[in-house]
Amino acid sequence: MRIHCPICSTTVEAAEAHIGDEGQCASCGAGFIVPAHPDDEIEIIAPDKPPIMKIDCPVCSTVVRVDGVNSGEKGRCERCSSKFIVPEYAGEEAEILERGKLPMSKIDCPVCSTVVRVSWDNIGKKGRCERCSSKFIVPEHAGEEAEILERGKLPMSKIDCPVCSTVVRVSWHNIGEKGRCEECSSKFIVPEDPGGEIVILERGEVPAGETHDAAGAEHASKPVEQ
């Protein structure tokens, strides 16, 4: 029959012949009494021989292999050198004694998406993007979105007028606001990304027989009054 480890919930195969005997989870090392039925409450006991366990470093989440006999003693992560108390079971969180240092990490600026290199020492502190000068809180993990404290300024960008295809220069400050093409007077919403879809608010007039392309004249977009 199949039962679930009472500590880490890993599925454990147990023969009916071992009902009432001592068992041990191969994943976390927990000891228990094999129940008569899978749905019965499982009694937890101390294992005869603590196994080698895999636990997550409480600082950098690196998998660390520890000997079960070291439960309650100091352990250390080889990657970030953090020190912690080895837990009794693999599913338990290790108590941090001393935070080590992680290598430099890369995160995306939450404003302009530029890759920014940050140090573990700066987690939870203010960071700044060198490209747009935006300020943010350095997240704990590279995949987390950084909290924006102050939006910086991006360089001028170029988009194509959605009506006449004239190249229009726009400022980051105009993102999400109304813009206007100087060539055909069309009005539109300035997109966040140069290649993003542009919402047309009002179509202007393109002179008859005249066409424009991305290599045509460049014009600056001006904010339009609401």
Image (cartoon, rainbow, N blue to C red):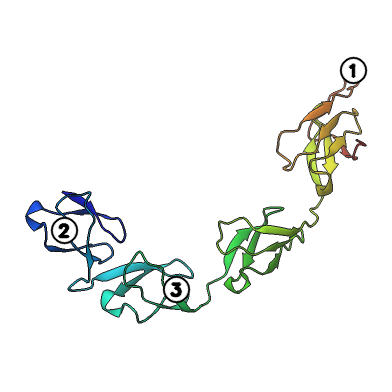
Image mark for residue 208: 1
Name the residue that disc number 3 marks.
79
Secondary element type, mark 2: loop
Secondary-structure class at tag 1: loop
Query: Would you place residue 170 above or below residue 123 in this image?
Result: above
The numbered disc on residue 74 is none
User: Can residue 44 be seen?
Assistant: yes
- Quarter assignment of residue 162: top right
| Gap between marks 1 and 2 measured at Cα | 87 Å
For discs 2 and 3, the disc positioned in front in the rendered view: 2
Residue type at tag 1: Ala
Relative to 128, residue 144 above or below: above
Tell me the kind of residue under disc 2: Val
Whether tag 2 and tag 3 are in contact, CB under 8 A, the answer is: no
Residue at the spot of label 2: 34
Measured from the top left, where is residue 41 in percent x and y?
Answer: 24, 55
Question: Relative to 33, is 104 on the left or the right?
Answer: right
